[in-house]
DNA sequence: GCGGATCAC
DNA sequence: TATGGTGATCCGC
């Protein structure tokens, strides 16, 4: 069996290989959209109707394997029915040959390799392994089901084409044209007319222009977006003062109290509102906005990046302007039925499932929540269900046919659908013996104030549902009246679903996925995995080509393979997605874990310039740190070569730092190490970044002085144990191409505070700030011959001049400008470069001293690793609600003037 | 703990 | 004229 599958699969591969080679003559020009016609499928029937083979040919007509990661994502709202092939062809043509493209090809190859490894691995699984994996997966499913919480109503509000909408509002003439916001290098977003051409966020403007020649590109006006965002937030605050904004146009709200009764609610709202306003005001005053860093350089294109300080704590989804509202419903009793399903590896791929009612419990408010938790644990240990018959080991497996088509039916019927019966939750007390599993749908949920048995429950439920819809409509309407901008909303029992729902009726619409398990399962059944938060380009490709899963139900049906292929974390995440489960807790604030600044520029390949840029970044970062009263124990740099290869390096300082020079002293070492590593080739960069991590919430450090051992950690008070970590399914190829490091490392953390400071002072003085003659000249020297690109790192600094290239290898005296100490050094003999490196080493380690002042970083410590266990459940644990959050903080942005 | 990779927005 | 910025998580080593 296995062999058959393998055979089939291989054959497909071969066919594909054969196809993508011929027809290189295809005339590309036919693919260029020179007209103003949108690239919708129906207007290009000829292309669309081409046979599959033809399509493949077109995609590969460049005689190279298709680079699928460069394809347009049409998963976005407003992009249905586009002629993908044609659009992708244009994108490909515009990109081919660029360094960016070459790098994408390289990355695609790595992914492909990873996929092949997984496929190999999968082919080696034995039946026994699969059977066991199935059991393990089912056990997890059972636990997840037990934790399913339908008692919350989460609303996800998403502003429509936000930036574009704002621009159109302020210039109505744009409404009738396809337009986008951003610059010719990168677009932030586009209006819906432009989307008909395939133009979307994240696409370079010049390519968008090829897709849509008439595209109007408007530059961003973040101040406007921010201001309007505040107006929107004022409306949101009326429904939930604890709403959680995720970006300028996205946030989560909890309107439980609002729905519950207007009175108490109103009161609270009043208070809240004030607080919120203040908050907003404050942030606003700081002048920082969601992350955009607009380089106002004339030549520089504005790029959009909305997030700078978005703490992004939430793991739940967050797409655009969405607000999630959690509605507590007056739930009564809930019963959970569980079923155990065993898969028997039957020849026909059928799985046998046995159902069993396992647990019964009630939800309600927080109290019930706890109960639920208890049950969870119980459930976990309750594997008794083993009684279910185990597999009949006889079979031969592969219950999972690789051909999705044929298998789909059976699997759907036998597996995915069946799970419907698993762990269902019903409201009301009906009861239920094992059978009711299947029809449980009837009384779902919450809302009803009715208690058991109440017939009127249904009517009340309807009323509740209507109320929810109306409330959300009202909220959207208020936003529109106030801002003249439309918003879309998704309402569901958890964040994951709410997000998907908000996209459903996207432009100016809303969708309510009611808190009933069967409805959720129906909703999720055909849901493309790519729509799930955390599943992006790569994950989708892996799931598609390895597991042959495109939808949630297909993913569920391959849960046994998942167990064998991916990490436990990833599996749990995938299972949750496939079951339509997600976080129901809007846990708000997680403290920020890092702060960084990075920028792209025209190639920089000379050490002095590298350092100057680095210093600049450190200065920026220092300002941000100060603005937030933070210090960092970990300092890192990020480098991206002109070939788009990215490198990151970090060091842990012996004490937290904040000042520019302190940051720079660490960053510089890392940078110099890299420069030396690439030597004798110059380090040719297109981007540089500096990052601060292991942050300490300290008051401003006295310029230069003692960081008193401040016990910043009052952290105890607020137990934030929650934080859900969303996606766990990202696998990493991991380090692999770490070139031959040159062991230059400096002993990190061995420097005493005094030494580090002194060191930094010295270095900074000499290298950047200072007017040191020899160096200052360097920095002001703008016109560096481009022919120097091929020179060595530490090229002679003009003293002896000459082509620095040769200078290094020559015997004649050569002068270098040491990037560390800033001094000019002349070497006469032998290998000047070697000597220079030696000098740099000495220079770098010179100040290192064993003594250390330890600052207990205690505080931050672990907060990260929350086991997946703790995640989700523990929902509302009350605390949350009262805990003060600082949601606005995540929107504070770096606003470079 | 580090560095690469992936993802969101 | 030529593909962004910020923050986070996961995983293999
Ligand atoms: N690669 C990306 C994608 C998005 N964003 C930012 C800019 C967008 O304005 C914002 C929201 O992203 P969406 O994809 O949700 O786009 P819109 O809100 O503009 O459109 P819509 O929600 O109608 O689909 O996030 C970004 O900076 N970089
Ligand atoms: Mg949006």
Image (spheres, coloured by chain):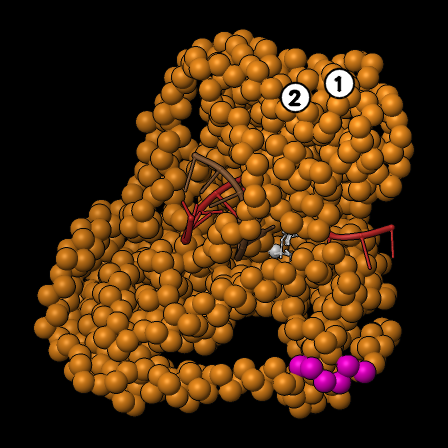
Chain colours: A orange, B brown, C red
Spatial separation of the CA atoms under disc 2 and disc 1: 9 Å
Bounds of the magenta span? A20-25
Q: In this view, does A640 lie above or below A819?
A: below
Q: Mark 1 points at which residue?
A: A825
Q: Are marks 2 and 1 on the same chain?
A: yes
Give the overall secondary structure of the magenta segment.
Answer: loop
Q: How far across and how far down the image is residue A528, in percent? A: 50, 71
**Secondary structure of residue under mark 2:** helix
Q: How far across and how far down the image is residue A154, in percent? A: 43, 55
A131 relative to A849 in the view: left or right: left
Q: How far across and how far down the image is residue A864, in percent? A: 39, 39
- How many marks the image carries: the answer is 2
Q: Which mark is residue A839?
A: 2
Return the chain for callout 2: A
Q: Is residue A536 above or below residue A123?
A: above
* Label 2 environment density (alpha carbons within 10 Å; few <14, some 14–19, many ≥20): some
Say whether residue A859 is magenta: no
Observer-nearest of A545 and A446: A545
Say whether residue A22 is magenta: yes
């Amino acid at each position: 069996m296995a062999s058959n599958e393998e055979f089939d699969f291989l054959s497909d591969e071969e066919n594909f290989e054969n196809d993508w080679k011929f027809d290189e003559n295809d005339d590309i020009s036919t693919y260029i959209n020179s007209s103003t016609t949108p690239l919708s499928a129906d207007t290009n029937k000829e292309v669309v109707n081409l046979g599959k083979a033809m399509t493949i040919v077109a995609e590969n007509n460049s005689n190279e394997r298709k680079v699928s990661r460069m394809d347009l994502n049409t998963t976005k709202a407003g992009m249905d029915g586009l002629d993908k092939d044609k659009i992708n062809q244009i994108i490909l043509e515009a990109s081919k040959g660029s360094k960016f493209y070459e790098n994408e090809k390289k990355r695609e190859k790595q992914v492909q390799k990873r996929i092949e490894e997984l496929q190999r691995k999968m082919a080696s699984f034995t039946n026994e392994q699969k059977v066991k994996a199935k059991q393990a997966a089912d056990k997890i499913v059972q636990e997840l089901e037990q934790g399913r919480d339908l008692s919350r109503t989460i609303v996800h509000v998403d502003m429509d084409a936000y930036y574009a909408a704002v621009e159109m509002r302020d210039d109505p003439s744009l409404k009738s044209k396809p337009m986008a916001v951003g610059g010719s290098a990168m677009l932030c977003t586009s209006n819906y007319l432009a989307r008909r051409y395939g133009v979307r966020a994240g696409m370079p403007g010049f390519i968008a222009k090829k897709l849509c020649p008439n595209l109007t590109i408007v530059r961003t006006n973040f101040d406007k977006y921010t201001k309007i965002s505040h107006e929107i937030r004022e409306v949101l605050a009326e429904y939930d003062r604890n709403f959680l904004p995720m970006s300028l146009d996205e946030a989560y709200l909890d309107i439980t109290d609002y729905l519950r009764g207007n009175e108490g609610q109103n009161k609270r709202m009043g208070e809240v509102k004030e607080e919120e306003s203040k908050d907003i005001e404050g942030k606003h005053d700081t002048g920082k906005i969601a992350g955009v860093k607009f380089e106002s350089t004339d030549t520089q294109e504005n790029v959009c990046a909305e997030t700078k300080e978005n703490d992004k704590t939430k793991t739940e989804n967050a797409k655009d302007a969405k607000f999630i509202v959690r509605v507590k419903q007056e739930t009564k009793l809930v019963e959970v039925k569980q079923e155990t399903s065993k898969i028997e590896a039957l020849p026909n791929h059928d799985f046998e499932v046995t159902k069993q009612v396992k647990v019964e419990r009630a939800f309600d408010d927080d109290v019930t929540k706890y109960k639920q938790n208890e049950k969870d644990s119980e459930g976990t240990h309750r594997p008794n269900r083993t009684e279910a018959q185990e597999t009949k080991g006889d079979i031969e497996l592969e219950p999972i046919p690789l051909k999705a088509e044929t298998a789909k039916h059976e699997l759907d019927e036998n597996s995915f659908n069946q799970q419907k019966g698993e762990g269902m939750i019903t409201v009301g007390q009906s009861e239920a013996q094992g059978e009711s599993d299947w029809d449980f749908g009837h009384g779902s949920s919450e809302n009803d104030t009715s208690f058991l048995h109440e017939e009127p429950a249904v009517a009340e439920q309807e009323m509740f549902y209507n109320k929810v819809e109306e409330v959300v409509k009202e909220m959207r309407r208020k936003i529109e009246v106030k801002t003249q901008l439309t918003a879309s909303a998704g309402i569901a029992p958890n964040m994951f679903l709410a997000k998907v729902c908000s996209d459903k009726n996207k432009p100016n619409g809303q969708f309510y996925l009611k808190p009933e398990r069967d409805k959720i399962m129906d909703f999720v059944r055909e849901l493309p995995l790519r729509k799930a938060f955390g599943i992006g380009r790569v994950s989708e490709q892996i799931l598609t080509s390895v597991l042959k899963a495109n939808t949630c139900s297909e993913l569920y049906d391959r849960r046994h393979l998942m167990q064998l292929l991916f990490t436990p974390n990833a599996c749990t995440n995938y299972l949750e997605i496939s079951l339509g489960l997600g976080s129901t807790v809007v846990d708000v604030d997680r403290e920020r874990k890092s702060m960084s600044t990075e920028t792209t520029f025209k190639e920089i390949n000379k050490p002095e310039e590298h350092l100057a840029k680095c210093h600049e970044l450190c200065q920026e970062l220092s300002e941000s740190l100060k603005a937030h009263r933070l210090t960092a124990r970990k300092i890192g740099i990020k480098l991206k070569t002109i070939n788009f290869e990215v490198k990151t390096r970090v060091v842990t300082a012996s004490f937290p730092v904040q000042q520019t020079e302190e940051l720079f002293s660490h960053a510089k070492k890392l940078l110099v190490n890299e420069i030396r590593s690439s030597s004798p080739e110059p380090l040719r960069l297109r981007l540089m970044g500096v990052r601060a991590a292991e942050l300490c919430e300290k008051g401003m450090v006295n310029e230069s002085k003692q960081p008193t051992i401040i016990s910043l950690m009052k952290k105890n008070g607020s137990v934030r144990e929650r934080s859900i970590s969303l996606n766990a399914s990202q696998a990493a190829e991991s380090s692999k191409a770490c070139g031959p490091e040159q062991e230059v490392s400096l002993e990190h953390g061995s420097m005493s505070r005094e030494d580090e400071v002194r060191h930094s002072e010295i270095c900074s003085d000499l290298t950047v700030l200072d007017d040191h003659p020899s160096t200052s000249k360097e920095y002001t020297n703008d016109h560096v011959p481009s022919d120097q690109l091929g020179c060595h790192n530490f090229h002679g600094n003009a003293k002896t001049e000459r082509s620095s290239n040769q200078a290094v290898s020559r015997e004649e005296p050569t002068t270098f400008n040491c990037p560390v100490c800033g001094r000019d050094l002349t070497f006469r003999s032998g290998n000047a470069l070697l000597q220079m490196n030696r000098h740099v080493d000495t220079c770098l380690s010179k100040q290192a001293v064993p003594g250390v002042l330890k600052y207990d970083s205690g505080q931050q410590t672990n907060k990260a690793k929350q086991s997946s266990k703790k995640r989700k459940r523990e929902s509302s644990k009350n605390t949350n609600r009262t805990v003060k959050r600082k949601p606005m903080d995540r929107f504070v942005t770096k606003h470079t003037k």
